[in-house]
Image (cartoon, rainbow, N blue to C red):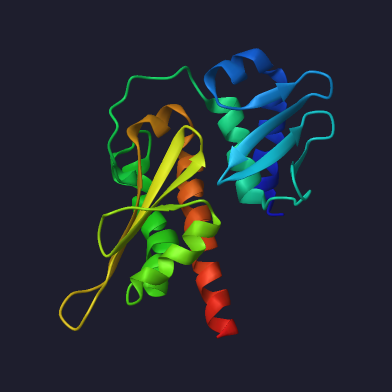
Amino acid sequence: METNYRIAYDKYWQDLKRKDPEEVTSHLAVTYSSNNRQFVVTFFNTEYVLDCNTETINGKRNGDVPDIMASIIMLNYLTYAQPPQGTAKRWVSLKEIPNGGMLFYPAFHKNSIIGLIKAFGHHSQQLLAPAADMGGKPATFGDASVIFQAFPEIPLCVIVWEGDEEVRANATILYEPSIEHMLHIESVIGLGMYLSSKLVRHCKHNHSLS
């Protein structure tokens, strides 16, 4: 585990242990059991148990341990969320999210968007199968698009436009503006990177099988 990830992971556990669980469950669609100090969080259609006694995260059904990026995002989700804000329901690019979205966008594009373009820019319908595995629902944007529920309150939309000889393929990941009140900007970016890498990895895996 990279050192800076480990530092963030440990810090968020300490932050979470200091939170009032009732406050967390009043803001978010999560459950908490005071008997064993466990939160249950739904992340991309999978329930995870976050145990404050052991500082561990496991899939509720199969005990799977999520990767470090997913773990940090789930912990940040529980520790960062503010009371629901009355923000408009619309889709925005990372560039439009305050506190650093514009600043971090070039790196995000390089690390997340380029991979989506390479994987799906000439076969956009291939996005749909790996997306469905993560609970994604097809949408009507671009040549292929899917809306995911990263968390019950946090949707993401992935859109792919196919390229040909004249037009370059393109892709994007969109958020709702309310995400700025739900996650730290680094977790907003991490969430997009996590989703992109999962979709791209699934696509490569399928190609290697065929």
Q: Quadrant of the N terminus?
A: bottom right
Residues 50 and 2: in front is: 50
Residues 12 and 86: in front is: 86
Residues 35 and 93: in front is: 35
The residue positioned 37% from the left and 39% from the top of the image is 100
Q: Is residue 149 rendered to the left or right of residue 103? A: right
Q: Is residue 37 rendered to the left or right of residue 102? A: right
Q: Relative to 206, is 183 above or below?
A: above
Task: Count up the numbered dots.
Answer: 0
Horizontal and vertical percent for residue 50? 73, 35
Residue 83 visible somewhere in the drawing: yes
Query: Residue 179 falls in which quadrant of the image?
Result: top left
Q: Is residue 160 rendered to the left or right of residue 22? A: left
Q: Quadrant of the C terminus?
A: bottom right
Residue 20 visible somewhere in the drawing: no
Horizontal and vertical percent for residue 99? 38, 34
Q: Relative to 115, is 1 above or below?
A: above
Q: Relative to 148, is 114 above or below?
A: below
Horizontal and vertical percent for residue 86? 33, 19
The residue positioned 60% from the left and 28% from the top of the image is 78
The residue positioned 22% from the left and 80% from the top of the image is 164
Q: Is residue 136 rendered to the left or right of residue 55? A: left
The residue positioned 78% from the left and 18% from the top of the image is 34
Residues 206 and 168: in front is: 206
Query: Residue 171 falls in which quadrant of the image?
Result: bottom left
Residue, far left: 166
Horizontal and vertical percent for residue 24? 60, 20
